[in-house]
Amino acid sequence: QKEVEQDPGPLSVPEGAIVSLNCTYSNSAFQYFMWYRQYSRKGPELLMYTYSSGNKEDGRFTAQVDKSSKYISLFIRDSQPSDSATYLCAMSALPGTYKYIFGTGTRLKVLA
Amino acid sequence: DTEVTQTPKHLVMGMTNKKSLKCEQHMGHRAMYWYKQKAKKPPELMFVYSYEKLSINESVPSRFSPECPNSSLLNLHLHALQPEDSALYLCASSQGLAGGREQFFGPGTRLTVL
């Protein structure tokens, strides 16, 4: 079993839809959770960073962490064609490890 | 400013060439990383520098040689590469006081080895 599982997609949605992207993980020591957006042939862009459990909102993006279920989500409201990209989750355990475990990424296509 | 810069953007080299990739950040971050990313795959960690000292080497072949001249700069020296080393090479940085903090990536260098 991989430490972090993420559905590769592609996920196709109409413009304006609410998008839900998810990752599950097996290591209960993970405490730091990140979501990145990566456009084709570009570097990953940090969208959301959360520590431990709970919700965090930033504009159209909401990140949720459920440590009891070992499950994290990224919601995108009012999705736009410009949101079409690959979304990577990443997580890290205790401070000082400097190792981030990435999901395989979900390809999202928002259709105009 | 959360910018990590990388040069060059593209690099084509032969298997006998020696070249270097450069990375720079001015966020005061004390941890810097090199990742390799193949198409449709997540980034794969190569090296981590913490406070200018190499702290993680993920069993990377010696044809890749990292260097951290100061807290803002990170280099990756390339020599005698193989065609399978063609990939997007990403630099990243994070605060060094504690791992697990936000990690910011540069735009990457797209390397092609002929």
Image (cartoon, coloured by chain):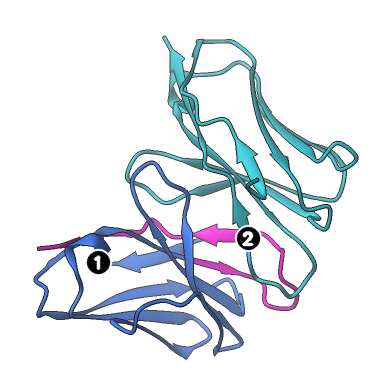
Chain colours: A cyan, B blue
**Residue at image x 71%, y 70%?**
B99
Can I make out residue B111 in this image? no
Other-residue count near label 1 (Cα within 10 Å), few / some / many at <14 / 14–19 / ≥20: some
Q: Give the quadrant of residue A20.
A: top right
Q: Position of residue A82 (x, y in %)?
A: 44, 25
Number of dots carrying numbers: 2
Residue stretch in magenta? B92-114
Q: Position of residue A24 (x, y in %)?
A: 71, 38
Residue toward you, A15 or A106: A106
Horizontal arrangement in the rendering, residue A46 relative to residue A110 (left or right): right
Q: Which chain letter goes with mark 2?
A: A
Horizontal arrangement in the rendering, residue B8 relative to residue A101 (left or right): left
User: Which of the two marks, 1 or 2, is nearer to us in this view?
Assistant: 2
Screen quadrant of the C terminus of chain B: bottom left
Other-residue count near label 2 (Cα within 10 Å), few / some / many at <14 / 14–19 / ≥20: many
Q: Residue furthest front?
A: A1
**Residue at image x 52%, y 42%?**
A104
Q: Which residue is mark 2?
A: A100
**Residue at image x 64%, y 15%?**
A18
Residue type, mark 1 in image? Pro
Q: Which residue is mark 1?
A: B8
**Residue at image x 11%, y 74%?**
B15
